[in-house]
Every structure is written in C-alpha cells, then in structure tokens.
Image (cartoon, rainbow, N blue to C red):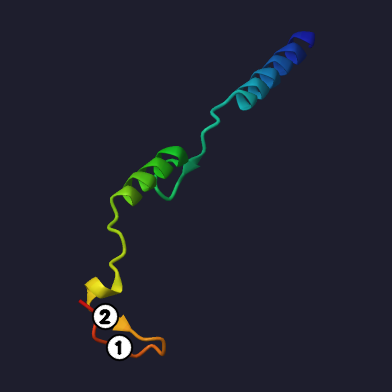
Amino acid sequence: MKLVFAGIALLIATVAVGVGCGPKETYCYEDKDTCEHVKRMKEADAMWEAPPVPDALAGHCYDNNGVEIPCPG
C-alpha cells in the first residue's frame, strides 16, 4: 500500500512540475499562431501601410464651415 501511495505522490509531483515549468508562450487561436509572432507580423504590416493622403492631394478642401472649396495650388 505504501508503494501505491508513493507512486501516486510521484505522479502528482511530476504533473505539478510539468504545469509549473511548462511553456510560457500564449497562443492566439484566432490567428492559429503564437501571440508574439502575430504581434510581430502586425507591426511589420503596419510599417508598409501608406500614410494618409492630405486633403489637397486628394482633391478635396473644405473651409471652416465644412463647405468644399477649390484647393490651393
């Protein structure tokens, strides 16, 4: 009987060490990848996004009342 209790105690200790020393990285299930990798990929994608186009280049200029006026230049 002591051997059974020793086996159970060893099993519980092994499981506790496995849980305590297991992987620390979180997983983003929506993207099917680790959260750290998803974060780095989103940062890399953000670097390649085009900057917002100023109103004058877009062809739309507005006065203080919100009325569209011809753009200068």
Of marks 1 and 2, which one's residue comes earlier in the chain?
2
Viewer-proximal residue, 58 or 15? 58
Residue 66's place in the image compared with 19, above or below, is below
> What residue is pinned by disc 2?
60
Image height check: is 31 above or below 51?
above
Q: In the depicted view, which residue is nearer to us: 39 or 30? A: 39
Give coordinates of residue 46: x percent, y percent: 35, 51
In three-dimensional space, the C-alpha distance between marks 1 and 2, rounded to whole angstroms, equals 7 Å
Decide if residue 73 is on the left or right side of residue 67. Answer: left
Tell me residue 51's x, y (percent).
30, 59
Residue 5: x and y, percent?
77, 15
Q: Which residue is mark 1?
A: 68
The image quadrant that residue 64 belongs to is bottom left
Residue type (three-letter) at the residue carrying disc 2: His
CB within 8 Å, label 1 to label 2: yes
> Helix, strand, or loop for circle 1?
strand
Residue plotted at (32% across, 48% down)? 47
Residue at left offset 28%, top offset 67%: 53
